[in-house]
Image (tube, rainbow, N blue to C red):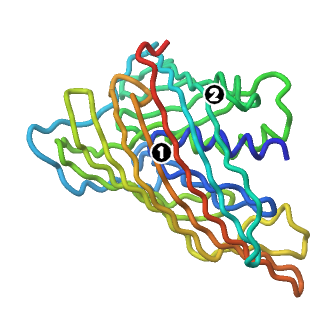
C-alpha cells in the first residue's frame, strides 16, 4: 500500500520532540505503533499521569508554554531507521531508511486559559507525498495536546489519507508535558501513558530531567521505555482464518531536548531508541514466528528566524 511508508515516515518525523519512536510496520500485520504523548488529565479526560519525582534546586518556577498568537516556528527534521527482521529464524532483507522534511508551525490563537491552536504543514520532504500535508492541533500551556486534524494536498490518494488518519494522536509528541508545580535545575518527572493504537495496548514512560534553565530557555534529558503485554493484533490484512499475536514488546532509549518556551518547536532535539517485538502468525497448522528490532535516530533543528 502506497500510504504505508508515508504513514511510517510522518510518525517518525513528529516524534522528534522526545517521545519513543514508532515501530516499523510489518508487511503482513500491523505492529504496535509508538504511544501518543500525554493528554491533559483535567482538560481532556485522559488516563495519562505526570508524576513529579524531584522539584530540583532553587530558584524554582513553573514550566509553561508562552508562544504568542501569530508566531511561527520552522524545524528541519531527520530520521534514520535500521530494521532487523527474522521470520521463523530466517533473516529477511531490509533497507535502512532516511526521511527528512521541514515542519512549519504557526500559533493561530491563544485563549484565556493559555490553550493554543497550532497549524502545521510539512515542506521540502524527501518523500514527495509528505509535502503539503498539514492540519492543526491544540495544546495547553502545560504541553498537553488534543484535537489533532489532518489536511491533504489535492490529489492525495485514498491509501495515503487512510494511513495518515492513524497518525492524528502522534502530533501530541510535538509538546513535552510539564508538571504542575514550580521546578528548578535537577527536577525530574515521569510521564506515563497507557495508549491503544490499532487495538494494541502498551505502556510508555518518559522520565525528564532539567539539566539547565535560563528563564524560558530549558535543556532537558529524557529516558524512554515502552512495554506491551501479550495480545491479539489487528489481522485485517491476513486471510480470514489467520491470527496474529503480539507475544512481547519492549523498547527504550534516551534523548536531549533544548527548548525555548516562547516557540512551538524545540531549538534542537535528538532521540535514539531501540524497540524489539515478537509476533506469531498462525493459519491452520502453519505458524510463523516474526522477530523485529528497530533502531531509530531522530533529530530536529529549529531555524533561528523561524521563517
Which percent across, then down, holds residue 294? 60, 58
Which percent across, then down, holds residue 4? 77, 46
Left or right: residue 125 versus residue 307 is right
Mark 2 residue crowding within 10 angstroms, few (<14) / some (14–19) / many (20+): some
Label 2 element class: strand
Q: Which residue lies furthest to the left in this view?
A: 58
State whether residue 293 is above or below residue 19: below
Q: Which residue lies furthest to the bottom in this view?
A: 285
Q: Which of 274 and 43 is in front in this view?
A: 274
Q: For mark 2, what is the residue?
A: 135
Displayed quadrant of residue 25: bottom right
Name the residue rendered at 74%, 60% in the picture: 26
Name the residue rendered at 59%, 74% in the picture: 248
Which percent across, then down, holds residue 149? 64, 33
Label 1 element class: loop
Q: Earlier in the sequence, mark 1 or mark 2?
A: 1
Q: For mark 1, what is the residue?
A: 44
State whether residue 229 is above or below residue 297: below
State whether residue 73 is above or below residue 187: above
Left or right: residue 164 versus residue 18 is right
Which percent across, then down, holds residue 162? 78, 42
Name the residue rendered at 57%, 26% in the picture: 103
- Per the model, the C-alpha gap separating discs 1 and 2 is 20 Å
Q: Which of 85 and 26 is in front in this view?
A: 85
Amino acid at each position: 500500500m502506497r500510504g504505508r511508508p508515508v504513514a511510517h515516515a510522518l510518525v517518525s518525523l513528529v516524534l522528534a520532540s522526545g517521545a519513543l519512536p514508532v515501530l516499523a510496520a510489518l508487511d503482513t500485520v500491523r505492529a504496535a505503533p509508538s504511544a501518543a504523548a500525554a493528554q491533559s488529565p483535567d482538560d481532556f479526560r485522559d488516563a495519562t499521569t505526570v508524576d513529579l519525582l524531584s522539584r530540583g534546586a532553587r530558584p524554582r518556577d513553573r514550566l509553561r508554554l508562552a508562544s504568542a498568537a501569530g508566531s511561527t516556528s520552522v524545524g528541519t527534521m531527520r530520521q534514520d531507521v535500521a530494521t532487523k527482521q527474522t521470520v521463523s529464524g530466517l533473516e529477511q532483507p531490509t533497507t535502512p531508511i532516511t526521511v527528512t522534511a521541514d515542519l512549519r508551525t504557526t500559533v493561530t490563537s491563544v485563549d484565556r486559559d493559555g490553550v493554543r491552536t497550532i497549524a502545521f504543514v510539512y515542506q521540502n520532504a524527501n518523500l514527495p507525498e509528505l509535502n503539503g500535508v498539514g492540519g492543526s492541533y491544540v495544546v495547553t500551556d502545560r504541553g498537553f495536546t488534543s484535537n489533532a486534524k489532518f489536511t491533504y494536498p489535492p490529489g492525495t490518494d485514498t491509501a495515503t489519507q487512510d494511513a495518515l488518519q492513524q497518525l492524528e494522536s502522534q502530533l501530541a509528541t510535538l509538546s513535552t508535558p510539564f508538571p504542575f508545580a514550580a521546578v528548578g535545575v535537577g527536577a525530574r518527572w515521569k510521564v506515563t501513558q497507557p495508549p491503544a493504537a490499532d487495538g494494541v495496548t502498551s505502556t510508555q514512560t518518559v522520565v525528564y530531567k532539567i539539566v539547565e534553565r535560563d528563564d524560558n530557555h530549558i535543556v532537558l534529558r529524557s529516558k524512554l521505555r515502552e512495554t506491551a503485554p501479550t495480545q491479539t493484533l489487528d489481522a485485517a490484512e491476513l486471510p480470514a482464518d489467520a491470527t496474529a499475536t503480539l507475544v512481547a514488546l519492549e523498547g527504550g532509549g534516551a534523548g536531549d531536548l533544548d527548548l525555548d518556551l516562547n516557540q512551538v518547536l524545540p531549538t534542537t532535539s535528538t532521540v535514539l531508541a531501540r524497540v524489539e517485538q515478537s509476533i506469531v502468525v498462525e493459519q491452520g497448522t502453519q505458524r510463523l514466528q516474526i522477530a523485529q528490532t528497530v533502531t531509530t535516530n531522530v533529530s530536529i533543528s529549529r531555524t533561528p528566524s523561524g521563517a
